[in-house]
Amino acid sequence: MHQNNSDAEMTTQEEEEERTLTKKKTKMKKIKRTFDFSKYKTRKIALELAYCGANHFGFSSQGCLQASNAETTNAKNNSHIRTIEGALFEALKKCRLVDPSKEIFGEPSVDYSRCGRTDRGVSSIGNVVSLNVRCKGVGGGGGGEDEEDDEDGENGEEIDYVGNLNRALPDDVRALCWYAVPDGFSSRFNCTSRRYEYHFTRVVRQNLAPPPRGGEEAGKCEPEEILDVGRMREACEKLVGTHDFRNFCKMNVKDCRDYTRHIKECRIEKKNTERTTGALLRETDWVLIIEGSSFLWHMVRCIAAVLFQVGLRADAPDIIDDLLDLTKTPRKPLYAMAPEHSLVLVGCEYDDSVINPGKRRVSEEARQGLEMHALAAARMHRLKASLWEEIGGKAHSPVKEDADTPSHNVKRSRELTRGLLSSTYYGTAAGEPKGEPVSLKKRSTEKTYDERIADLNAKNERKKTTKEEAKVR
């Protein structure tokens, strides 16, 4: 009897295992269901983004095609190059907010546009893109301005665009909020102004006089300001208004022929931070704020570089007037742009009837998730900063000094100055000597606009001749 029960239990167990195995095989044979995007409605939205650009090769996914092999040592092809827009496109397709089978850039049904095409290393806390995305509701067709309020589904709720995207985006790219906008809206062409901030550090050195005879300590002299912010502020005022900024940008005559831009605001403000670095240095953080309707290629970084020339006393504030006067300065002096990592696109302004703070849309769950993510990232970077401050502190620990090189005679190196100022203010262009900053008036110059146009026309003529000769052959 006991043997019969054991056999029955084994039979039942074997049958159960066989059923489980059959279910697994059936599941593996099932064809993956395709997502039919045509069954869903779409609507036009504007999406506000924030990102840290340090580990990205710029915002635009199209720009990656021009990257050099040296910049992509870990990539076999351009598809591996990290860009903010590339990460956004991947997240949009992963969340099925756009048709995964179609390209986003240049696709008429998506109608995608970007406001700020930031360069490699540049960050943002308010860039804006606009596009058509999937919304709640079934049936083809897009949402328009009149459907703005009644297209949030049967329960008055729309897809959680911010929450869904942030779960698919990399850690250094975040969606902040979205706006319902009318069809035909362009985040680029409808933008009325863009605001940038360039962050830098002002260093004040406390000089030490040689110790008096018989004394044990060195006497203090007047502090030395390495960056004169007052002169920089005077120069900022000269930039406001409508000017031809061809001497403040990287000129590209192939794509741009008009270099006139309007600057609404340009000022320098002190941030509420002050630090003591080592025994002799005191640092304060400052920010250059510049707002305009639009900007030329590398325009803000070029403006910052010239302002630092003024702050370092290599040029007077009047150098701004000279560079804006094309009759006086037809050729742009050769100078290095200010580094990209200190530049931040703060925000993009639009007509209040379309985009304003009262129309921001983000779910409470997504808002809390974004807040926790930002706090965790800030905490991590504070720990790293604290570690490096302690390492720097050890460099100033008391050590046994050589009698021939007392500490009060040690001079600040130019390399340390560059690092503390967060910019290559001593940066030189081709043919310029290294060392102390050189006046822009004494530097070599680039080609004029007319010379560049002549070169471009000659190049096009050579291409045309080559094609005609090839046809004859």
Image (cartoon, rainbow, N blue to C red):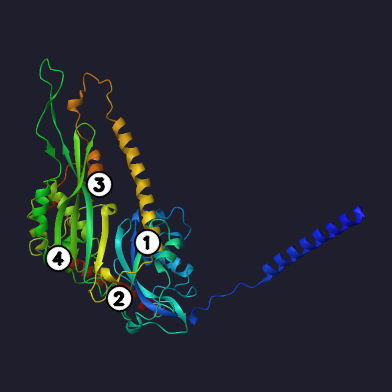
State if disc 3 and disc 1 touch (CB < 8 Å): no
On the image, numbered disc 2 is attached to which residue?
186
Kind of residue at disc 2: Ser
Kind of element beneath mark 3: loop
Whole-Å distance between the Cαs marked 3 and 4?
26 Å
Kind of residue at disc 1: Arg
Compare marks 1 and 3 and give the one earlier in the sequence. 1
Kind of residue at disc 4: Lys
State if disc 2 and disc 4 touch (CB < 8 Å): no
Q: Alpha-carbon neighbours of circle 4 within 10 Å: few (<14), some, or many (≥20)?
A: some
On the image, numbered disc 4 is attached to which residue?
264
On the image, numbered disc 3 is attached to which residue?
422
Kind of element beneath mark 1: helix
Residue 367 numbered tag? 1
Compare marks 2 and 1 and give the one earlier in the sequence. 2
| Residue shown at the point (49%, 73%) measured from the top left | 100
Kind of element beneath mark 4: strand
Please name which of the two marks, 1 or 4, marks the residue nearer to the observer. Answer: 1
Number of marks in the rendered image: 4
Whole-Å distance between the Cαs marked 2 and 1?
25 Å
State if disc 1 and disc 2 touch (CB < 8 Å): no
Q: Quadrant of the N terminus?
A: bottom right
Please name which of the two marks, 2 or 1, marks the residue nearer to the observer. Answer: 1
The x, y position of residue 236, in whole percent, is 12, 57
Compare marks 3 and 2 and give the one earlier in the sequence. 2
Compare marks 4 and 2 and give the one earlier in the sequence. 2
State if disc 4 and disc 1 touch (CB < 8 Å): no
Q: Alpha-carbon neighbours of circle 2 within 10 Å: few (<14), some, or many (≥20)?
A: many
